[in-house]
Image (cartoon, helix red, strand yellow):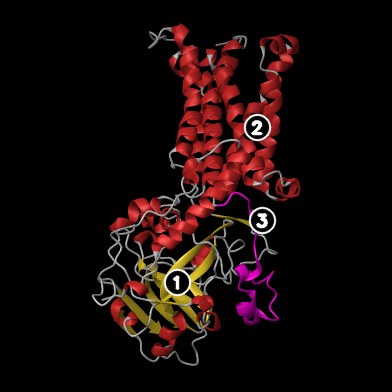
Amino acid sequence: MLIKRPDDIKTSDITDEKIYHQRRAFLQTGSRAALAVVAGAAFPGLMFPGDAAAQMAALKFKKNSGFSTDEEVNSLKDITRYNNFYEFGTDKEDPAKYAHTLKTDPWNVRVEGEVEKPADYQLEDLIKESQLEERIYRMRCVEAWSMVIPWVGIPLSTLIKRFKPGSKARYVEFTTLHDPAQMPGQKRGVLDWPYVEGLRMDEAMHPLTLLAVGLYGKVLPNQNGAPIRLVVPWKYGFKNIKSIVKIRFTETMPNTTWNLSGPREYGFYANVNPEVDHPRWSQGRERRIGEFFKRKTKMFNGYEEQVASLYSGMDLRRNY
Amino acid sequence: MHSMKPFVNPKFVKPLVFMACLLPLVFGIQAGFTDQLGANPIEEITHRTGDWTLRLLLITLAATPLRRLFGWGWPLRVRRMLGLFTFFYACLHLLTYLVLDQFFDWEDILKDIIKRPYITIGFGAFVLLVPLAVTSTNAMMRRLGKRWGQLHQLIYVIAVFGILHYLWLVKADYLLPLIHAAILLTLLLVRAWYQRQSLSAGRPAPQTS
């Protein structure tokens, strides 16, 4: 299975972490200097090169630069220690501390609903026929911070085509594992467990929509949603459901977890939109992790050209 | 009132409390220099300074109930210092927002204060703290006389505002704001209970009993 280290891996296929770190060090120096000037104090701990999680098994993948941004990538350290994954606690650093209890091997994904081939798939069977790709995407959290993350995964559309959904399948609903023994955060009813997310079929079939199994060229760390998670880069981060155990095709719009928790604050679409504020805070700007100054948030998180047509004629203020 | 033997020599109480109140700042600076502030240091600094403002506010409000319940006198002697440290951390919290988070973007700051209820009420709490800090000196106490006590009743409003500020900003996990609210409620109930006691004790005795 893919989680195991393939023997035939070519070094040229592996993303060179050194290059990431060199670029990172460059950014670090600049931002640190800016902050030192501005704040009058240097915080050497603000930024650092990602420490290589040596235990992460390498994946074999091709780069898909056509879909990737060339912006500076966030360090592996920041990507793996600053996570919203309430299944392991509501503090950003809880997932990194507690997600080790999650067992990702073996892992089954049930595919059901309006589909020709409902079945339980072992994760490796889902992935093995597909070529893994690296996609460097921006990730914009609804809390007004953002990162740039080098994911490794497969386009969701590849899998959906294999499942052969019927004509009634208008939406795709995803469900996270529900097991408080493995996910201690589920012992408290902070959200209505299990976590559920959904996409309209055309959103799910969009070439940007990814099912990620890796990060920085290696197997996804537990705190980032191992072993398989959704990545929809033009939507707020909470749409990117983690540790998926069920994919269900439905005729009606799925009830999604954050929408149930705060219907006025978190819509089904959750497209990144600087014009439509969260009722409690502005979405006009965001802090890129590792940077001091906030940057302007872009429509559809900068993927407007690729996805705006999905929503033509829709009132995005109402369909937030 | 039962009184207990003091744990420490009374003359050391003030310097000890003073140093204790500086610890969050010292640890915060140390964390900044040793990469312990996480991936989003500005958010972390905002949270830490806000947390300590609320904690110190509740500790300040605990002075009277502690004396009532256990007969401890020392908390009252450091109450002014605790209140001023509350103000100190509130200033750091506000400065973190103005400088590190918004970097003097006055337009956005003004919009936040007007449009975002949790910021409106948090800012309101800060504004109300200012006159209390300004009038905390002995000279001001003497000058204001009876009105000093009335003015400083504002601390209850500030405490409620502070906890609402916390409650209104969290996304889904209300546990910590509710714990703070429960502590505040307990402290207020203890006060109210003793106030009622002393009121009825101070009243002239009923004519027939």
The quadrant where residue B94 appears? top right
**Label 2 residue SS:** helix
In what quadrant of the picture does the C terminus of chain A appear?
Answer: bottom right
Residue A295: % across, % down: 64, 57
Q: Which residue is mark 2?
A: B157
Residue A118: % across, % down: 35, 86
Q: Chain of mark 1?
A: A
Marks 3 and 1 share the same chain = yes
Q: Nearest the camera: A276 or A185?
A: A276
Closer to viewer: mark 2 or mark 3: 3
Say which residue appears at 68% left-offset and 17% top-offset.
Answer: B149
Q: Which residue is mark 1?
A: A230
> What residue type is disc 3 on?
Ser
Residue B92: % across, % down: 60, 33
Mark 3 to mark 1 CA distance (whole Å): 25 Å
The span shown in magenta is A291-320
> What residue type is disc 2 on?
Val
> What residue type is disc 1 on?
Leu
Q: Is residue B20 magenta?
A: no
Mark 1 to mark 2 CA distance (whole Å): 46 Å
- State left or right for residue B164 relative to residue B127: left
In what quadrant of the picture does the N terminus of chain A appear?
Answer: bottom left
Say which residue appears at 51% left-offset and 50% top-offset.
Answer: A28
